[in-house]
Image (spheres, helix red, strand yellow):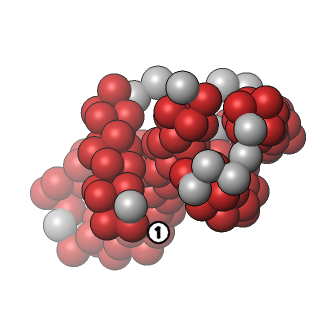
């Protein structure tokens, strides 16, 4: 019973790591998209305006949009999430390695139920501390990425266990 509970905790840790990795990829994509939009708008709009004088209203709109995006960019959460998610992933990966190492002793029956239970709650406690340390707000829910994280966690365990 306690072995199964430890295994479920290990599985959830892998799902959480993968989910955070997917959220990090999403944040990187948004951050990159905003930077590209600003770079393209600022470097091409003035030249394009001069070339296509007939469509000056389009280029004026592009410039205005880039100015608005540039003004709100510091307030978008993606830059903060990049740093927080990266640090959190590193800490959770270390916890995963230690937990997987401990799984061997658990699966071989070398630990008592009380020791397994203690190890399981240690995973929970360290995961919670890492979340508190790196995430100042909440992690946005995302069922699509959560489903993908579970799928990837299943693949991970099928490959290594």
Q: Is residue 96 visible?
A: no
Quickly name the residue at label 1.
Answer: 39
Seen from the viewer's position, the closer of residues 122 and 145 is 122
As drawn, 7 above or below 93: above
Residue at coordinates 52% horizontally, 40% vertically from top-left? 7
Residue at coordinates 56% horizontally, 44% vertically from top-left? 10
- Residue 71, how many percent across, how many down? 63, 42
Q: Is residue 59 left or right of residue 121?
A: left
- Judge the density around disc 1: few (<14), some (14-19), many (≥20) Cα neighbours within 10 Å: few
As drawn, 124 above or below 43: above
- Residue 108, how many percent across, how many down? 57, 56
As drawn, 92 above or below 126: below
Secondary structure under the numbered disc 1 in the rendered image? helix
Q: Which quadrant of the figure contains the N terminus? A: top right
As drawn, 20 above or below 87: above
Q: Which quadrant of the figure contains the C terminus? A: bottom left
Q: Is residue 111 visible?
A: yes
Residue at coordinates 51% horizontally, 48% vertically from top-left? 14
- Residue 93, how many percent across, how many down? 65, 60
Residue at coordinates 61% horizontally, 49% vertically from top-left? 109
Q: Is residue 67 left or right of residue 126?
A: left
- Residue 79, how many percent across, how many down? 65, 51
């Amino acid at each position: 019973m306690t072995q199964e509970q430890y295994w479920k905790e290990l599985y959830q840790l892998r799902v959480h790591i993968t989910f955070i990795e997917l959220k990090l990829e999403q944040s990187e994509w948004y951050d990159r998209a905003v930077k590209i939009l600003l770079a393209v708008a600022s470097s091409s709009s003035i030249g394009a305006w001069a070339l296509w004088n007939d469509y000056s209203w389009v280029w004026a709109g592009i410039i205005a949009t880039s100015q608005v995006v540039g003004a709100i960019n510091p307030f978008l959460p993606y830059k903060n999430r990049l740093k927080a998610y990266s640090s959190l992933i590193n800490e959770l990966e270390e916890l995963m390695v230690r937990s997987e190492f401990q799984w061997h002793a658990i699966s071989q029956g070398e630990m008592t139920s009380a020791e397994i239970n203690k190890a399981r709650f240690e995973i929970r406690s360290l995961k919670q501390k890492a979340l508190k340390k790196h995430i100042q707000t909440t992690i946005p829910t995302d069922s699509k990425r959560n489903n993908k994280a579970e799928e990837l966690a299943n693949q991970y365990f099928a490959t290594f266990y």
